[in-house]
Structures are given as C-alpha cells and as structure tokens.
Image: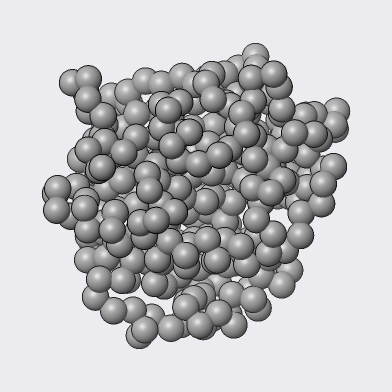
Amino acid sequence: MRRRNQVRPVKLRIKKIRPGDILCFVTQRNEYARLPYFLQHYRKLGINHFLFVDNASDDESAAFLKAQPDVSLWRATASYKAARFGMDWLNWLLFRHGSGHWCLTVDPDELLVYPHWETRPLQALTDWLDAGGQKSFPAMLLDMYPRGRIGDEPYRAGQNPLDIAHYFDPANYMIHKNGQYGNLWIQGGPRARSFFGRTPELAPALNKVPLIRWQRRYAYISSTHMALPRGLNLVYDENGGERISGALLHTKFLSTFIEKSSEEMERGEHYANSQEYRAYSAGLQDNMTLFNAESRSYEDWQQLQDLGLISQGNWA
C-alpha cells in the first residue's frame, strides 16, 4: 500500500473490464521481443484484459503495450528490488482492480498450459474451479531450453519461443512442504543441475500459484510462489490423491537471455543481490548447453501428465 504511488498510469483502459472477465497481471522491463507472442498465447486462452507495470524500460516494449486495445499500462521507475521484486506493485493493482475476478499473475517468459488447454479456454477451467469451491490453481515452473547453446539460434519478435526452446527435464526435482505457509517448495531441473550443482538448496523455486479468484484481503508474498491467506497455497492432496494442476513453460533461455543476464547482474535488482544471474553469467561465458541425455522434447499436456508434472485430477 505504501508503494502505490510508485505506480503511475500511462494508458488505462480499465473501464473495459466487465464482471466475469479473467485478468492478467504482469511486470516487465525491456521484453519487447517476447510481448507479441505472449499476448497471442494468453488471448487465445481467454484472457480478457492485461494489466502491465513497466519498470523503466528503454526499448520498444512500453510503446507496444500502450497501443494494445486490451492492455492497461502503468510505469514504475523505483527500485524493482525494494518493491519486493515488483510484487508490491502488482499486489496494489490486484487490490484495486482484481477483486472478484480470476486473476493470472505471470512473467513475460511464462506460458501457462493446463489439462485440455488446447480445446478448453481458461473460462472453462475457472468455471470448474468455482463449481468445486477452489479459489486457486497451481502451476509448476518448467524450464524450457534449446538443444544447442543458448545463443545459437536468434529469437525473433513474435516467434513462438517453443520453436527454439522446446526441451525440458522430465525428472530431477526435489519437493518439500513449507511449514510456515503450507505451500509445496519445488526445486531442480536444468537450472539446479547446471548453475547450482554445488548448492542445490539455492536453486530457484519452481512452485507457483499463478491463478487466483482474487479478493481484497489477498496478497502474494514472494513472487507467485505463495500467497496469503495460507489456504490459497493448499493446492495439493496429502492423502494420496491428485488435484488438478498446470505448468508454466518457462522460456527464459533464448538468445535474448545472454544480454538480459548481463544487464540484470549489473543492475543487482533481483533476489539475493542477483545471485541467480551471477550464476547464469558464469555459465554462459563457457557457452553452456542445458540439453543432456535425459532431456525430453515437449509434445503436449498429456505428456506432462504422464511424467507426473501436471495433473487433470478429476477434471475429465
């Protein structure tokens, strides 16, 4: 609430939001190349309106977003790190505009997939969740990467990032329960084995709760890894059954990432003094490839379910 004045309106179209609309909340900086496909993907899923906070971009991204008819745009020039990595800005917008709506909070390099997503829009999923009294929906962050070196194939604006980064780790994941907030904490995958091999406990968290039927008393704590009240994090079955879940296909590792990692390391605006980006930078200097003998090429949601990475639960 104290940081709400850091978020300044640029182009607002919030009067277009109608009851029942599904909203998408995003913070971005210099992501112009990703934005055309990002919007295409989520429009196809059924997002009705996008609420973006631009963190002092100096590329074409802000101008591009300003021109989109289903985007409301704010700008924040204050410290991303001091705003709890942009979460304070999005919590404020969720508080002001998200109450009563199903709200999806994602990054520009995250593409949500879920059981039957190719044939059933988000509205079908949220209607089913409403009918079952479920207020939140989880999605594991699944790191995607190319077969060769990260910079070998240039990424073009508007291109489907999965055309390049379509491999993932089918296993190699660690999971435990967070005793304080009740969420499951997942680590592992290519970032853990390639960048945090000696310190796997420091590897990035892969658990997220990106889709919530929002109320004003709700708030995200740390990115979308966990939320308050704690009941929003109880998205799993502790009695041996399965509950529905999806995946966020994380397309960070494209050619654009090389320049991005260097910039973010110098800015020092990410978690733990950008420790993650320092690990990336060291690895990229050695022309690292994430692909290995166990890598799988992404096919569809059924493949992810067969591997135990997502579940349709009883949503047949």
For the N terminus, give its image quadrant: bottom left
For residue 64, which quarter of the picture? bottom right
Q: Residue at x 57, y 43 (%)?
A: 250
Q: Is residue 117 left or right of residue 217?
A: right
Q: Residue placed at 26% from the left, 36% from the top? A: 313
- Is residue 185 visible in the rendered image? The answer is yes
Q: Is residue 310 above or below residue 119?
A: above
Is residue 92 visible in the rendered image? The answer is: no
Judged left or right of residue 46, residue 95 is left
Q: Position of residue 129 (x, y in %)?
A: 21, 51
Its colouring scheme is one colour
Q: Looking at the image, is 70 positioned above or below residue 122? A: below
Q: Where residue 289 sits in the image (x, y, percent)? A: 77, 29
Disc count in the image?
Answer: 0
Query: Which x, y percent locates residue 206?
Result: 48, 34
Which quadrant holds residue 238?
Answer: top left
